[in-house]
Structures are given as structure tokens and as C-alpha cells.
Image (cartoon, rainbow, N blue to C red):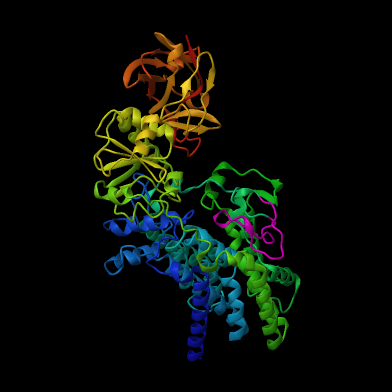
């Protein structure tokens, strides 16, 4: 028996290796190759891992303060597979500087996906051949493979399969249940939620049995304590609890057509997984509920439904009561409170705001369909074995596997030899190699999670040895710290104070105009345009070229025209706003303590002086509790006036402009901006002030 087990493990290991090289090829499977980690969420993995690896050991162990300054980041919110991050940080003396462990994790996931499926199937069939062939369905599962393309940690579906396996054991069930939950905490919290729910579906009976009720509560308390300690050590509590809640429940949902919809949206491909099924419409966010079964999987769904009504030889490997519980709980959570078929809303129902906030822990509810998805496959496969002879069942399952391969061939071709990972290395200029020799920190003027700038610089910040950056991507963050840090940066920048350990980046003309206005006349500061990114440094790091010199000289703000009401719109390429604005409900509202506008006027129509009327609107919802709303106005860095918008009944204020000036840089120093979070009506921490409705230049 022991030799047979070793032989089966060897077979599955070889099978997993074949699929591993099919998906990644020999190039991307190399742990020293990081060039494929450059799309969507994969962009941040290597940067975050490098920051964690190169940082000192901290407490909590998983804290990651230098990757996203002041946002409360940790290895769990960077999605870098905490269990591997800690192991390889311990081993960092023995690994290369450019080492990545994500390809190793992919192999481990493929192997465990197949092996645990094999163990479950072999438990019921006792046929090694049938179980090994059937386990390939789980490697080929589109819901599994799609996660390998965008969320490597979330591809750990073997955790879900392990939960199924545990419930079929007679011994050590409680210990393994707890172990599985702890493992999920070390990998990804979405999996923890699934396993936690699964755990208590099978424990719920104990509540109704008097002799087991006390044990139920003792076990629950023990598991909670161990889980909380583990989560604390990994950095789950580096952000406030309310910031662990994410928006999107109901948006990232399961669609009633998802089992039959082969839409492949990985890395924005928007093509098909299927040779036979057509792509069906769905709301944009429903990619999280992707659950295409494949042609053979549809047959398994039919057998799954048949098993519900069949009294004998069904494919169920639990009592029907448990099956119904699994289906009901996960299906209801997955479809959410807004039920869609294709792009049509079938029905919806309101949810209490506090309950909705709690459901924010789930956020991407479409993922909750995964246990039901795998239950369909297990049920269909076991049904075939139980209702046909061994020889016939082997033939049938082999044919169904070939049909599944044929149907999924369009999707599988996207994975062949790492094709799904679009190699993107846009930073070719020499300056990117030189900057780390002069600076410790990389900064941006206005921080934003997973910004367009960040996407242009894959595998750069951590790899190049910078100590800190506020250009980042995190699954969750401390919203208050993010905003307060951004406001502090704006204040220092407006006042011309930047430390000599940092340089700044931007891709927006409006932010560049602010840089130029504040630092452009000082020969100490240098502007570089490299690989589509503007760089501001306080020292000459490389020689400047004529192209970028001309670009910075030719860069001028937009011109205001007389007697025309100019709407103040969100446009960072050629608008009027500088720093400190937010687009809210299609309105431009001041964000923080300092907000600025920058513009020029036509000197031909200006002799001595022009008046600029700035028409504003105070959002009553924000300011009905504020006794005063004073702002200080500065024109070209010189104090102009202080006014109180609350006392202004005209809804506009006037600034007299000296026509001898070419460019006007106006900034508002706002005393009492308020966030919806401070008013306890929303989690948004943006300190909103007033809206500029339009600008009007008058004689």
C-alpha cells in the first residue's frame, strides 16, 4: 500500500510538472526571472516582496511600512503569499537578489490541486487510474487557471479542496479543520472567509446537541484566539478594522449565467474559454464570479442536479442536508443582493447599511461560488463511477476529459508558455539605474493606490534598492493615513520644501506645471522626461537632453479668456487645477488643506488689471456643522486675502490679477475641510472643502 501511495504521488508530481511547464515554459518557471510579473495585480508582487525581504525584521512580523509610506501596509495587503514571504525572508542569505517564489507557488498549487482532488476521488472509487485522470479536471478548471493569471495567492484553491477532504476523514478532523483555517490566513483572506464558513456549516449540528454544545463554544473560542494572534503577527491589524472593509459587494458578484459563460477577461483579453459555448453579456464587475464549467462540466452539473433527486448511487459524498447547506449559503453570498442574468437585473433587495458594511469583508462575492463549483465536479465524477462498471467508467471519464480539453482549448492557448503574462518592461533609460545611487525615497505629488504611474514601472521600486516609496498597490490601506500623508506632502511641496533624500515623479502636465512654477526658476532643481515619466530631482543625476529642456520650456498653463464662464473640469493633462482636488459626483471639490489652480491670461487683452471671479458652492451635507469656513488666498506664492466662504452670500469671490504676470498660480489654504468619515456617514477620508463651479475673467 505504501509503495502504491508513493507511486501515485510520483505520477501526480510528473503530471503537475508537465502542466507547470506548459503554463509557464522554461523561461517564466525560472525563479530568477521576474519579467513576467508585470500585469495588473502581479505588478506589485515583486516590489512588495523586495521591500519586505530587504527590510529589517519588525513586529508585527508582516508589517511593510516602507512600501506605501503611511498607509499601514503589510504582507497580507500586498498579496505576496505571507507564508512564502516569511520563509524566504528567513532564507534571504541563500537566495539571489532577483529571486521570486511565485513560479514555485504556482507549481505547488498545481500539484496540490491535483493531489488533493485525487485523494478525495480515490477515497470513494479506490481506483488509482480513474482518480488520477479525474484529478486533471481540477488542474484544467478555468476558475483555478484564471487566478493564476491575475491573483497568484488566490489560485490556492487546494485549500478549498482540502476542506472537502477533511470532512470525509474519521480521525483528526478538528485539528485539520483548524490547521486549514490557519493555512488560509497565511495565504489570502478571501480563502479564509470561504474555509471559515465551510468549517461552521459542518460544525453547526453541535449547537443543537446538548452534549456537544459546550465543546462547540470552547473550540470556537480557541480557534478565534489562535486566528487573531496569527492575523496580528502577519499584519492584518496594521490598518483600522473599518478600513478592512472594501466596497463592491453586489458589484463583484456571481451572474446566473456564469456556469455557461466562457468570457475570458484575464488581463483584459475579453476572448473565450470555449470552443462550443458563446460569450454571454454580463456587468463589468461580474468577472469575479467567473465560473465557466466547460462542456464536460455542464454534464457534471446535470448529474449534480440529478443527484439531488436520486435516492441511491448519487455522486454526493456528504449527507444531502450538508450539501443543501453548502449550496444555499455560498450561492446566496455569491449572487449578492442584486441578482443578474447576463446584463439584466432580475431582482434586488435593500441591505441594512451595517450588514452591508459587514459584507464588505467579502467584497468580491463572486468568489463564494468556488465551493459549489468544485462540488459539482466531485459529484458528477463520483456519480459516473458509481453508476457504471469500473472499465466503462474509466472510458467515460477519459472521453469526458478529452472533450473538456477540446472545449477549453481556446482558453488554454492563452496560458501556453506563459502567454497570459504580458512581459512589460518600459523603463529603458539609464536614469533609472542612476537614481538609486542618489536617493532613498521615491515619491509622487498626490498618492493613489495602484495609480497609472505605478503601472508604468513594474518591478522597479523594490528591485532597485530604494528604502521607501509612496507609489504602491495594496488590497487594503489606512484611508486616513493615506490622505493625511498626501496632504502633508502637498503642503511641503507648495512651500518649496522637499528633502534631499527624495525625488518626485508625475505623468500629468498639471502637476508638472506646479513643479515648474515652484522649482523651475531654481537652478538647483532638474526636470527629466524619461520613458513618458517626468522626474524632479534636486541634483543633476544625468545630463539633460534638448528634447526635455524644450518640452519643459514649451509647457504653459491653459489660457483663460475674458467674459467666458469656464467650467472647472477634471483634466490633469490640460486643465486649470493643480494639486489638492478630487472628482466627486462629477464635481471638482477641494481635497485637503491646500488646493491650487494654475492658468495664464491673454496679455493682448490685459492692460493693467483683470478680475477673476471664482464661483463656488459649499456642499451643505459637508459643512452644516461648521461654524466658519475661512480660506487664505495666495497668488504666485504671495498672500492675497483671507475670506470666509460661509459668510459670502454672492457665491463667488474675486481676485485682482496683475497683467504684468504671465502665469498665475493661485492656491487656497483651507482651515476647516471635513471628511465624510469624520461625520460618520462614510469611510471616505478625503477632507472636502468647496466646489469650484466655474471661473470667469472680467475687465
Quadrant position of residue 80: bottom left
**Foreground residue, 288 or 640?**
640
Q: Is residue 274 magenta?
A: yes
Quadrant position of residue 402: bottom right
Q: How many marks?
A: 0
| Picture coordinates of residue 25, whole percent (x, y) | 48, 70
Residue 258 visible here: yes
Relative to residue 544, is residue 244 depicted above or below?
below
Q: Is residue 459 left or right of residue 153?
A: left
Q: Is residue 689 magenta?
A: no
| Prevailing SS of the magenta stretch | loop
Quadrant position of residue 63: bottom left
**Foreground residue, 468 or 259?**
468
Q: Is residue 2 left or right of residue 459?
A: right
| Picture coordinates of residue 206, whole percent (x, y) | 55, 67
Residue 66 visible here: no
| Picture coordinates of residue 633, whole percent (x, y) | 37, 19
Q: Residue at x 50, y 37 (%)?
A: 682
| Picture coordinates of residue 132, whole percent (x, y) | 58, 81
Q: Magenta stretch: give its range.
A: 256-282
Relative to residue 631, is residue 33 depicted above or below?
below
Q: Residue at x 39, y 58 (%)?
A: 46
Q: Residue at x 26, y 67 (%)?
A: 93
Relative to residue 507, is residue 433 depicted above or below?
below
Amino acid at each position: 500500500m505504501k509503495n502504491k501511495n508513493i507511486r501515485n504521488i510520483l505520477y501526480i508530481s510528473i503530471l503537475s510538472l508537465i502542466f507547470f511547464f506548459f503554463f509557464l515554459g522554461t523561461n517564466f518557471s525560472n525563479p530568477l526571472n521576474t519579467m513576467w510579473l508585470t500585469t495588473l495585480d502581479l505588478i506589485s508582487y515583486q516590489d512588495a516582496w523586495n521591500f519586505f525581504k530587504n527590510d529589517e525584521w519588525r513586529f508585527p512580523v508582516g508589517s511593510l511600512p516602507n512600501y506605501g509610506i503611511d498607509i499601514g501596509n503589510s504582507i497580507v495587503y500586498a498579496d505576496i503569499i505571507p507564508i512564502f514571504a516569511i520563509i524566504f525572508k528567513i532564507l534571504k542569505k541563500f537566495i539571489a537578489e532577483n529571486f521570486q517564489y511565485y513560479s514555485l507557488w504556482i507549481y505547488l498549487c498545481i500539484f496540490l490541486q491535483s493531489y488533493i482532488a485525487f485523494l478525495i476521488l480515490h477515497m470513494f472509487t479506490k481506483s488509482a487510474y480513474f482518480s488520477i485522470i479525474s484529478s486533471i479536471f481540477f488542474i484544467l478548471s478555468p476558475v483555478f487557471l484564471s487566478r493564476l493569471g491575475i491573483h497568484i495567492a488566490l489560485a490556492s484553491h487546494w485549500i478549498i479542496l482540502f476542506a472537502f477532504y477533511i470532512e470525509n476523514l474519521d480521525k483528526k478532523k478538528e485539528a485539520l479543520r483548524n490547521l486549514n483555517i490557519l493555512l488560509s490566513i497565511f495565504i489570502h483572506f478571501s480563502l479564509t472567509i470561504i474555509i471559515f464558513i465551510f468549517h461552521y456549516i459542518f460544525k453547526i449540528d453541535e449547537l443543537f446537541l446538548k452534549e456537544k454544545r459546550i465543546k462547540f463554544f470552547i473550540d470556537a473560542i480557541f480557534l478565534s484566539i489562535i486566528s487573531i494572534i496569527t492575523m496580528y503577527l502577519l499584519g492584518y491589524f496594521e490598518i483600522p478594522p473599518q478600513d478592512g472593509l472594501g466596497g463592491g459587494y453586489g458589484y463583484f458578484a456571481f451572474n446566473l449565467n456564469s456556469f455557461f459563460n466562457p468570457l475570458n477577461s484575464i488581463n483584459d483579453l475579453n476572448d473565450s474559454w470555449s470552443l462550443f459555448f458563446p460569450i454571454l453579456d454580463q456587468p463589468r464587475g461580474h468577472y469575479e464570479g467567473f465560473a465557466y464549467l466547460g462542456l464536460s462540466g455542464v454534464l457534471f452539473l446535470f448529474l449534480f442536479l440529478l443527484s439531488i433527486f436520486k435516492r441511491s448511487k448519487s455522486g454526493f459524498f456528504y449527507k444531502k442536508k450538508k450539501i443543501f447547506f453548502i449550496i444555499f449559503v455560498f450561492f446566496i453570498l455569491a449572487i449578492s443582493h442584486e441578482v443578474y442574468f447576463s446584463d439584466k437585473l432580475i431582482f434586488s433587495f435593500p441591505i441594512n447599511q451595517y450588514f452591508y458594511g459587514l459584507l464588505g469583508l467579502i467584497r468580491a462575492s463572486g468568489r463564494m461560488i468556488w465551493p459549489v463549483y468544485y462540488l459539482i465536479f466531485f459529484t458528477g465524477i463520483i456519480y459516473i463511477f458509481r453508476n457504471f462498471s469500473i472499465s466503462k467508467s474509466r472510458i467515460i471519464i477519459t472521453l469526458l476529459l478529452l472533450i473538456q480539453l477540446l472545449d477549453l482549448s481556446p482558453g488554454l492557448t492563452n496560458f501556453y508558455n506563459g502567454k497570459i503574462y504580458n512581459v512589460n518592461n518600459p523603463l529603458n533609460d539609464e536614469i533609472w539605474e542612476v537614481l538609486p545611487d542618489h536617493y532613498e525615497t521615491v515619491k509622487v505629488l498626490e498618492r493613489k493606490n495602484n495609480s497609472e504611474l505605478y503601472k508604468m514601472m513594474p518591478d522597479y521600486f523594490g528591485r532597485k534598492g530604494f528604502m521607501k516609496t509612496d507609489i504602491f498597490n495594496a488590497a487594503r490601506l489606512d484611508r486616513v493615513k493615506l490622505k493625511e500623508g498626501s496632504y502633508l506632502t502637498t503642503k511641503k511641496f507648495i512651500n518649496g520644501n522637499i528633502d534631499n533624500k527624495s525625488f518626485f515623479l508625475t505623468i500629468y502636465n498639471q502637476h508638472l506645471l506646479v513643479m515648474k512654477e515652484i522649482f523651475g526658476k531654481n537652478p538647483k532643481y532638474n526636470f527629466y522626461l524619461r520613458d513618458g515619466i517626468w522626474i524632479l530631482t534636486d541634483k543633476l543625476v544625468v545630463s539633460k537632453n534638448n528634447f526635455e529642456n524644450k518640452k519643459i520650456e514649451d509647457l504653459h498653463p491653459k489660457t483663460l479668456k475674458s467674459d467666458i464662464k469656464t467650467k472647472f473640469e477634471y483634466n490633469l493633462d490640460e486643465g486649470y487645477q493643480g494639486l489638492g482636488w478630487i472628482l466627486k459626483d462629477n464635481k471638482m471639490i477641494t481635497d485637503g488643506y491646500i488646493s491650487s489652480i494654475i492658468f495664464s491670461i491673454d496679455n493682448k487683452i490685459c492692460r493693467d488689471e483683470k478680475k477673476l471671479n471664482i464661483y463656488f458652492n459649499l456642499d451643505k451635507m459637508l459643512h452644516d456643522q461648521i461654524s466658519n469656513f475661512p480660506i487664505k488666498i495666495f497668488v504666485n506664492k504671495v498672500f492675497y486675502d483671507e475670506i470666509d466662504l460661509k459668510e459670502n452670500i454672492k457665491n463667488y469671490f474675486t481676485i485682482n490679477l496683475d497683467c504684468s504676470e504671465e502665469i498665475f498660480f493661485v492656491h487656497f489654504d483651507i482651515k476647516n475641510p471635513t471628511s465624510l468619515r469624520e461625520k460618520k456617514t462614510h469611510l471616505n477620508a478625503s477632507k472636502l472643502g468647496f466646489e469650484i463651479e466655474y471661473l470667469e475673467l472680467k475687465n
